[in-house]
Image (cartoon, rainbow, N blue to C red):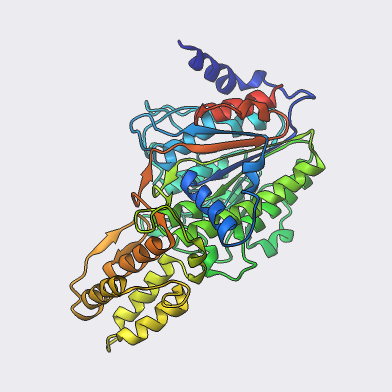
Amino acid sequence: MNLKSILLSALLTSSVTLFATDNAPKYIFYFIGDGMGPGSVMGTDTYLRLAAGRSNPLLWERFPQCSMSTTYSYNSPVTDSAAAGTALSSGHKTRNNMLGMGPDSVAVRNIADDLKEMGYGIGLVTNVAADDATPAAFYAHVPSRDMAYEIDTQAAESKIDFLAGSRIRGIKRNGKYSGIYEKFAENGWDIVRGVKNYNEATSPRVLLINDVDTLNNNSGYAIDKPAEWNLLRDYTATALNHMTKHTPERFFLMIEGGNIDWAAHDDDAATIIREVLDFEETMQLAYDFYLAHPEETLIVVTADHETGGMTVGQKSVGYNCFPKRLEGQTISKANFNDLVSELLKRPNPVSKEEMKQILTDKLGFYTIVPINEACQKRLDETFERTFISRNDYFNDALYHKFPEFVEEVFTIMNEIAGFGFTTTKHSGNPVGVCAIGPGSDLFGSPLDNTEIPLRIMEAAKR
């Protein structure tokens, strides 16, 4: 048995022997930006500096300890979210699509289990489904991340104190209502619909989801919402309220910015940047808590993997980047796609003049985004194929399927703003790791993702 296996066994299997000391953090915040690689972080920094007039980088980049982490899975140099979530929660590599299990399909312990046994309250927050891969990695053990009902059943039977997300996916089973909400209730959970109704909860265990059941896995992009809207921030504020009320002595909160990944799968630079800024705004809540309890609070920030292969700069702009041009975009690529889909259903075809006005209103084309003759020709040709001849192709970006015109519009937007993408899937690029507070010194050197939960546990038992 090698040294790492010994450490895994000591820290994650024999957790009953662990205990917190006076030097250990009482409050641990674990922030995971889904798909938030160096490109999306630097893209946001570039936007802040060149467009928003802000000189300081993102909050976590100013933490005293910052390093990088590798993310490969057991069976691939490019991980999926299930394998990455398992690594970040348990310290074990596993196969893509597997959740809370090793590659041999044997369940592995995670730090939520261990911290709970040490007296910490446990809260998990995301702005995508509460049973999606990252949050589920902290309570579920299944061979496939797609086993939504089984994942939700394990959530209901877990020792989690607070679970929040846009929805849960296991509502139906074999085409019928699964009875999953009753299963949560039987296990002592209050099911709360919407932040505004949290005060109705009386149980120390709360499942907080959207006001109504939705088919969409995420909560909608920030760019499509009112300026003050930030579901991740509101869920996190509610979680912090819940934990300080019910487990004030010690708690662990995992907070995932899931929509960063969704936007990155779409290669949608403006939407990615807005989601990263919402992630930072949410983190400010934890940082304010840290400032009030600096000797007792550890904040660790990382990502499960990189998505999209985003770069600052591409050949279309040479040694430059123009993020200010993204400010003309007031709609996500996904919602623009919905708009185009509705136009395609019209009995009378949309005209080029009408589409030009839409592009001006929604994306700032012809005003803040300069469209030259070559770009206009590309727009005209793809408009013809998509709307007139209907001789179209679709690009599958995992969560959305885009017709050629939508792809061309956003390719042009990225080219003119100066942001590049290599894929609509994940990449094997490393991700950042930053930390502040007691135990943060453990995160100042390059890591593998499996080492991060081990070091959180090392900090917790100091």
x 21%, y 74%: residue: 385
Q: Assign the N terminus to one quadrant of the image.
A: top left
Is residue 37 something that shows in the picture?
no
x 33%, y 75%: residue: 341
User: In this image, 454 relative to 318: left or right?
Assistant: right
Q: Quadrant of residue 339?
A: bottom left
- Residue 31's spot in the image, x, y percent? 60, 43
Q: Quadrant of residue 359?
A: bottom left
Q: Assign the C terminus to one quadrant of the image.
A: top right
Between 191 and 450, the one lying in front of the other is 450
Q: Look at the picture and state if 96 lies above or below 370.
A: above
- Residue 242's spot in the image, x, y percent? 73, 49
How many circles with numbers are drawn on the protein?
0
x 76%, y 23%: residue: 21
- Residue 260's spot in the image, x, y percent? 49, 53
Between 74 and 323, the one lying in front of the other is 323
Between 71 and 212, the one lying in front of the other is 71
Q: Look at the picture and state if 171 lies above or below 120.
A: below
Between 74 and 48, the one lying in front of the other is 48
Q: Look at the picture and state if 368 lies above or below 95.
A: below
User: In this image, 409 relative to 456: left or right?
Assistant: left
